[in-house]
Image (spheres, rainbow, N blue to C red):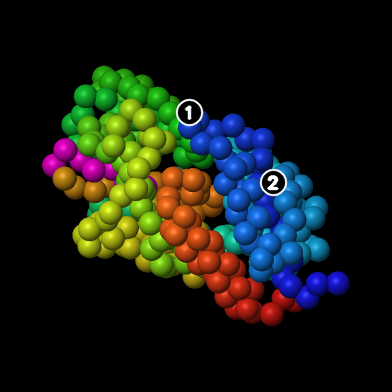
Amino acid sequence: MSDRPRVLFVTDLAYQARGRRYCDEDIFLTSRLRDDFDVALCHPLDAAALMDAFDAVVVRNSGPVLHYEKEYSAFREQAVAGGTRVYNPLSGRGDMAGKQYLLELTAARYPVIPTIDRPEDLHLLPEAGQYAVKPKAGADSIGLSFVSPQQLDGLAYGDILVQPRIDFRYEVSFYYVDDAFQYALHAPDPERRWVLEPYEPTGADLAFARRFIDWNTLDHGIQRVDACRTREGELLLVELEDLNPYLSLDLVSDRTRDAFVTSMAESLHRFLDARPRT
């Protein structure tokens, strides 16, 4: 029997995402992580039943939790109760916990697209030709709609977020393992979110992204900081993805991809060594 760490890699290989092939990325990652770990793949709906036989559960391209909220909540509760090590750790404050963080960051005056969830806070939003309305539990643009200023008063507040529709130049994503920056990609065409190209961040760009990595306080794991560049040149946070961020590894150089896998494997080893399994 192997004495290497046993990792349950949670992924939905059949999930169809716009402009991305989740399965290719996870097939690649697991093929490389097998150099360091004994790896088994499973669908997210099977994770709770299988995870006790493994040293860690790695949640990767498992699809939007919106499609299986009840089962995901049960998985989280079972993992916490049993002391199962889940990577990313379940203490994430970003998308892992829903979109509430956008409200918290707005209130704390972080550089984020202004976000409200109550009609009495509408005055806090800047004037815009349109406003984006999205469910708090949304992902992958599921449930996203746009409304006019005149429609804001008639919305069913409570489970939705409202933001001004930003006229931005492009979107850019910063990818991290633990607190270490790995690479950045951007979408030059605002209408084609997942047509990405390598991006060379400035010092100011990295300082922007690092604020959100520090805010999230995850000691281990993979995070993606998504931002948009406004017409005035400012970066604003769009999303802090800390549950199962797609990595677009097929769009980076071989050297960058190899460095990412090395960083992820080292992070997993540190995560497993952080405390003894009980």
- The residue where tag 1 is placed is 143
Determine the residue located farthest toward the right in the rendered image: 1
Depth check, front residue: 150 or 246: 246
Amino acid type, residue under disc 1 in the picture: Gly
Seen at 41% across and 67% down, the residue is 180
Residue 214 sits above or below residue 198 on the image: below
Q: What range is drawn magenta here? A: 226-232
Label 2 residue SS: helix
Please identify the dominant SS of the magenta region: strand
Rendered location of residue 109, percent (x, y): 25, 54
Secondary structure type for disc 1 = loop
Name the quadrant of the N terminus: bottom right
- Residue farthest toward the left in the current orientation of the protein: 232
168 is higher (above) or lower (below) than 237: above
The label shown at residue 44 is 2
The quarter holding residue 31 reads bottom right
From this view, report whether residue 188 is shown above or below residue 155: below
For the residues carrying marks 1 and 2, which lies nearer the camera in this image?
A: 2
Q: In this view, does 149 lie above or below 213?
A: above
Q: Residue 255's spot in the image, x, y percent?
A: 44, 59
Disc 1 to disc 2, C-alpha distance? 22 Å
> Is 59 placed left or right of 219 in the picture?
right
**Residue 123 position by quadrant:** top left
Where residue 215 appears, as percent x and y from the top left, is 37, 63
